[in-house]
Image (cartoon, grey):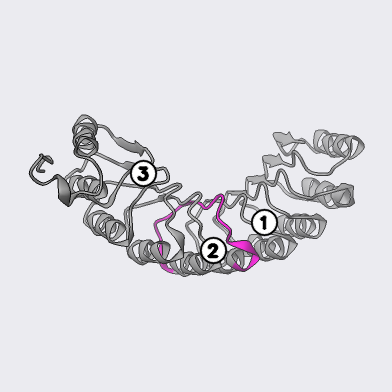
C-alpha cells in the first residue's frame, strides 16, 4: 500500500493528510477482529485503501463504514469486488452512506452468491421499494444472511411486500429490523402472512412506523400459528385499545414469544393493565414493554 505524498496529491479527492490518517488507522486495526470507520468524509480513494486491505486481511470479521460519506458507484464497486474474495468478514454495516437504489442493487448482486456475510446493516441509505425488491430477490436465494437491518429507509408498503413474500421461502434469516420505513397496515398484513408460514425468523422490529389496529391484529392472528418468533418490537405506531382483545388472545395462545414491545402506541392505561394481567396469569412473555 503506497502512502500519498505531495507529488500525487492532485489525484485524490481528499487532502493528503486524510489518506495518511486512514492508512495509519488501518495499520492500527490490522489485527483487530472489528474494523470501524465512523466518519463523514470517506472518498473513493479512501474506500480503495480499505478495500485493498480487505483483499489480504483475514482477521477482520466485522466491517463498519458509517457516516454520510463521499463514495460513488465506482468506489463501492471496488469495495464489493474486494469483499467477494474475502472469506473473513461476516458482519458488514454500511449505515448512512446514501447507497440509494442503484448502489444497493449493486451490493445485492454481490451478496446473492456470497457465502460468508451473515450480518447486514443498511440503515439510513435512502433505499426505496426499488432497492427493497432487489433485497427480496436476494433473500430468495441467499442462504447465509441471518441478520438484516433496514431501519430508516423509505421502502414503504410496496417494499416490505417484496421482502415479506421472499421470506415465506427463506429458511435462514432470524432477525429482521425495518423501523422508520413508512409501513402501514397494508405492509403489516403482508408481514403477517409471512409470519404465519415462516419457520426461521426469531425477532422482528417494526418500530416508528404507521401500523394501526388492522396491522397488529393481523400479526396477532398469525402468531397463533407461529411457534418460532420470540421477539416483536412494534413500539411508536398507531395501535389503540381496539386491539386489546387480539393482543390478549395472542398471549394466551402463543408459546414462544418472550418479548413484546408496544411502548408509545395509543393504548390507554386501562388497556395496558389488561395486557399485563393476562400475561401474569399465563406467565408466557417474560418482557412486555408498554
Q: Residues within 10 Å of mark 3 (few under 14, many from 20)?
A: many
Q: Position of residue 268 (x, y in %)?
A: 89, 39
Q: Quadrant of the N terminus?
A: top left
Q: Residues within 10 Å of mark 2 (few under 14, many from 20)?
A: some
Dot 2 or dot 1, earlier in sequence: 2
Mark-to-mark CA distance, 3 and 2: 21 Å
**Local SS, label 2:** loop
Which residue is at the front of the view, 137 or 144? 137
Drawn side of residue 265 relative to residue 153, left or right: right
Dot 3 or dot 2, earlier in sequence: 3
Q: Is residue 136 above or below residue 202?
A: below
Task: Report the number of numbered marks.
Answer: 3
Q: Quadrant of residue 29?
A: top left
Q: Residues within 10 Å of mark 1 (few under 14, many from 20)?
A: many
Asked whether residue 78 appears in the rendered view, the answer is yes
Residue located farthest toward the top when viewing the structure as drawn: 28
Q: In the drawing, what numbered circle is on residue 65?
A: 3
Q: Quadrant of residue 40?
A: top left
Q: Position of residue 124 (x, y in %)?
A: 51, 50
Residue linked to disc 2: 128
Residue at the spot x=39%, y=62% of the render?
Answer: 103
Q: Is residue 258 above or below residue 178?
A: above
Query: Which segment did they paint magenta?
Result: 141-158
Residue at the spot x=58%, y=66% of the render?
Answer: 159
Q: In the drawing, what numbered circle is on residue 226?
A: 1
Residue at the spot x=67%, y=47% of the render?
Answer: 208
Does residue 75 show up magenta in the picture? no
Q: Which is in the foreground here, disc 1 or disc 3?
A: 3
Does residue 157 show up magenta in the picture? yes
Which residue is at the front of the view, 216 or 151? 151
Amino acid at each position: 500500500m503506497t502512502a500519498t505524498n505531495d507529488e500525487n496529491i492532485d489525484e485524490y479527492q481528499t487532502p493528503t493528510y486524510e489518506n495518511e490518517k486512514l492508512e495509519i488507522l488501518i495499520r492500527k486495526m490490522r489485527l483487530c477482529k472489528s474494523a470501524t470507520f465512523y466518519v463523514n468524509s470517506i472518498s473513493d480513494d479512501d474506500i480503495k485503501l480499505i478495500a485493498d486491505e480487505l483483499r489480504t486481511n483475514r482477521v477482520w470479521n466485522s466491517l463498519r463504514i458509517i457516516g454520510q460519506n463521499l463514495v460513488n458507484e465506482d468506489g463501492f464497486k471496488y469495495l464489493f469486488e474486494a469483499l467477494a474474495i474475502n472469506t473473513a468478514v461476516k458482519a458488514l454495516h454500511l449505515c448512512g452512506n446514501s447507497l440509494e437504489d442503484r448502489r444497493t442493487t449493486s451490493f445485492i448482486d454481490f451478496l446473492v452468491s456470497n457465502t460468508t456475510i451473515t450480518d447486514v446493516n443498511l440503515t439510513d441509505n435512502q433505499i426505496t421499494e426499488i432497492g427493497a425488491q432487489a433485497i427480496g430477490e436476494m433473500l430468495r436465494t441467499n442462504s447465509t444472511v441471518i441478520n438484516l437491518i433496514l431501519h430508516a429507509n423509505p421502502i414503504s408498503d410496496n417494499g416490505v411486500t417484496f421482502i415479506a413474500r421472499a421470506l415465506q421461502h427463506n429458511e435462514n434469516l432470524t432477525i429482521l429490523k425495518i423501523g422508520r420505513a413508512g409501513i402501514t397496515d397494508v405492509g403489516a398484513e403482508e408481514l403477517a402472512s409471512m409470519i404465519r408460514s415462516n419457520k426461521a425468523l426469531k425477532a422482528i422490529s417494526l418500530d416508528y412506523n404507521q401500523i394501526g389496529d388492522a396491522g397488529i391484529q393481523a400479526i396477532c392472528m398469525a402468531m397463533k400459528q407461529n411457534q418460532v418468533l420470540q421477539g416483536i418490537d412494534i413500539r411508536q405506531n398507531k395501535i389503540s385499545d381496539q386491539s386489546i382483545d387480539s393482543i390478549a388472545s395472542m398471549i394466551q395462545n402463543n408459546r414462544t414469544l418472550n418479548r413484546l414491545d408496544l411502548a408509545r402506541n395509543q393504548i390507554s392505561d386501562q388497556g395496558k393493565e389488561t395486557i399485563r394481567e393476562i400475561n401474569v396469569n399465563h406467565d408466557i412473555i417474560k418482557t412486555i414493554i408498554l
